Amino acid sequence: MTETILEMRGITKTFPGVKALSNVNFAVGRGEIHAICGENGAGKSTLMKVLSGVYPHGTYDGEIYYAGDIVEFKNLRDSEARGIVIIHQELALSPYLSIAENIFLNNERKGPGGLIDWNQTNFQAAALLKRVGLRENATTKVNQLGVGKQQLVEIAKALSKEVKLLILDEPTAALNDEDSDHLLELILSLREEGITSIIISHKLNEIKKVADTVTVIRDGKTIETIAKTDVTEDRIIKDMVGRDLEHRYPDHEPQIGDELLRVENWTAYHPQDPSRVVVDDVSITVRAGEIVGIAGLMGAGRTEFAMSLFGHSYGTRISGKVFMRGTEIRTRTVSEAIANGLAYATEDRKTYGLNLIDDIKRNISVASLKKLEKAGLVDDNEEFAVANQYRKSMNIKAPTVLAKTGKLSGGNQQKVVLSKWIYSDPEVLILDEPTRGIDVGAKYEIYTIINKLAAAGKGVIVISSELPELLGISDRVYALSEGRITGEVPISDATPEHVLKLMTMEKPR
């Protein structure tokens, strides 16, 4: 029987208006990889913040036992002193400092006279980088690294603190497949060194790959802990959502009407390198009530196409024609694109999609303030009523529309972005990675919203890196490769193999 390194008993955490955790019990064996699954807003990150001291002792009810002792952490420093290190979903690195400076930030390597010993700092950092399999010079600035490498720097930083229990919150959410595999292999190798890991993830295939045990949390309560041998995707989904997801995609009977949007010969060049074509002579059509998927590998130019179309938000030397219901329209600015019936929900909701320090109400109304105007001023009561209506209809989990958007979980933030654009009443809505970083339950809700939009006669373009998702919700799929449309496939003929073949077609050189 494995010795227990961590046990949390009866953990209850309340925020104003919402009970985030309710009598959670959770145990982790020494030297194992323990996965925590659950929907967005289920309380996974809150539980880990209670454990690491982000929410100090006294702000929650219950007891935490670590390495046989009752612990009462007041802050992060207390938990790190005991070898518990948390790596948050949003990476906490300083972009303008070197890798070595980041690794030993607040944990500096000092020499005689209390000054920083830079030789020692860089030497130890290089040894840690070797341990995590990162082939970079320790003096390289962090802003020169991709997200995958930054994640490895975070783990090296944890190892410098002599970590015994490593907590990773959605470590692969922003990574491509190659970086994800490298990271998972690293977590497995740390287990060989005797380091215990807790990994919070939505990606069920990753959990199956690395986890020894899986605990599922739903609505702030622990549902069950499953041993590796009993882990199946269906079981985890059923525990997470509280229902079987036989059909991961809601039924959709398309009612396809006349042509809404037609884009002809759309071309855009790179903003920094005007000789490089990023979007190459793209022509597409979208009909009323139709969901059109755009499939492509990373770097194929899908987001670039959508952004250049929506108010020329990306690129230079943009050319091509756009027609709405047969009439040519201009989309030179974002305001012009919105006025002509286009909307674009960005893939980067935290940077471009939302104002995180503002409330839900203002985030929903911000693209359509003209609709709420009375005598040149925004009607505050009307704005509140509209936002509240969306909070209910979209099932946004927040006590009130005056809650700060940055405090919501990823899935709920995504619903706020969708509410904002639906309220602008577009003819055609472009959704860029609408379910990125979102759990299976919230995904189902968002697919239902997409179906409703199509049923109301809107045209919907969905850009997604998940091929099963595109094939599950679209009526027609375009494949994009190296900025060109390489094929158009009706959903009845779309197989993963066929679409993937089109996605990997190269330009004749």
Image: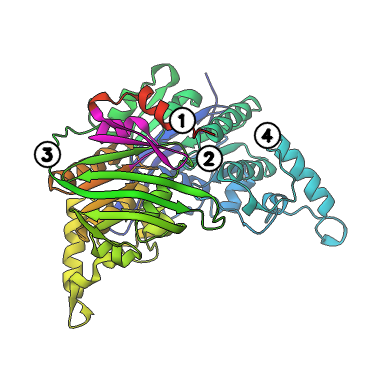
Measured in 3D between alpha carbons, the distance from the residue under mark 3 to the one under mark 2, in whole angstroms, is: 47 Å
Give the mark nearer the N terminus: 1 vs 2.
Answer: 2
Q: Which residue is mark 4?
A: 133
**Is residue 239 left or right of 26 when viewed as pictured?**
left
Let me know if residue 483 is in the magenta part: yes
Give the mark nearer the N terminus: 4 vs 2.
Answer: 4
Residue 355 in the image: above or below residue 471:
below
Residue 349 in the image: above or below residue 292:
below
Residue drawn where x is 45% and y is 28% of the image: 207
**Amino acid at the residue labelled 3:** Gln
Q: Is residue 183 visible?
A: yes
Q: Which of 74/253 is in front?
A: 253
Residue 328 in the image: above or below residue 443:
below
Q: Which of 382/221 is in front?
A: 382
Q: Which residue is mark 3?
A: 255
**Amino acid at the residue labelled 4:** Gly
Q: Residues within 10 Å of mark 4 (few under 14, many from 20)?
A: some
Q: Which residue is mark 1?
A: 504
From which residue to which does the magenta span run? 463-491
Let me know if residue 120 is in the magenta part: no
Q: Quadrant of residue 462?
A: top left
**Amino acid at the residue labelled 1:** Thr
Residue drawn where x is 40% and y is 42% of the image: 44
Q: Which residue is mark 2?
A: 167
Circles 1 and 4: CB distance less than 8 Å?
Answer: no
Give the mark nearer the N terminus: 1 vs 4.
Answer: 4
Q: Which numbered disc, 1 or 2, marks the residue closer to the eye?
A: 1
Measured in 3D between alpha carbons, the distance from the residue under mark 3 to the one under mark 1, in whole angstroms, is: 31 Å
**Is residue 258 left or right of 7 when viewed as pictured?**
left
